[in-house]
Image (spheres, helix red, strand yellow):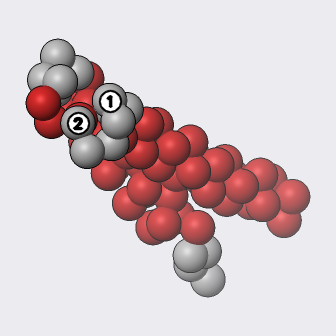
Amino acid sequence: MIDIKIPIGLMFSLLGVILTIYGFTTMSNTEMYVKTFGINMNLWSGIGMLIFGGLMLLLTKLNKKKAE
């Protein structure tokens, strides 16, 4: 049986990597972040997605170890 946490974790991890890289590359563009009061939302959203995706993959791995 497939665990739904695997595709969710992979999707959030992949999108998190893309957003984090984009946030780092556009960090010097201050005009872009005027609407968010100078906060680099791409960077922080990407980091949050990476954490969530990694947590989903970790929970899947721990659940498989527990089942064995």
Disc 2 secondary structure class: loop
Residue 10 tag number: none
- Look at 17% across and 16% down and name the residue there: 28
- The outermost residue toward the bottom is 1
Instruction: Kindly report the distance in space between the C-alpha atoms of the residues bearing marks 1 and 2.
Output: 5 Å
For this view, does 30 lie left or right of residue 45?
left
- In the rendering, at what x and y percent does residue 44 appear? 43, 37
Q: Residues within 10 Å of mark 1 (few under 14, many from 20)?
A: few
- In the rendering, at what x and y percent does residue 24 appear? 25, 23
What amino acid type should be assigned to the residue bearing mark 2?
Val
Above or below: residue 42 compared with residue 65: above
Q: How many numbered circles are shown?
A: 2
Q: Quadrant of residue 51?
A: top right
Q: Is residue 44 visible?
A: yes
Q: Is residue 20 visible?
A: no
| Residues at discs 1 and 2 in contact (Cβ within 8 Å) | yes
Q: Residues within 10 Å of mark 2 (few under 14, many from 20)?
A: few
- In the rendering, at what x and y percent does residue 54 appear? 56, 45
Q: What residue sits right under mark 2 in the picture?
A: 34
Is residue 12 or residue 68 the one in the foreground?
Answer: 12
Task: State which quarter of the image contains the N terminus.
Answer: bottom right
Q: What residue sits right under mark 1 in the picture?
A: 38
What amino acid type should be assigned to the residue bearing mark 1?
Gly
- Look at 60% across and 74% down and name the residue there: 3
Disc 1 secondary structure class: loop
- Look at 84% across and 65% down and name the residue there: 67
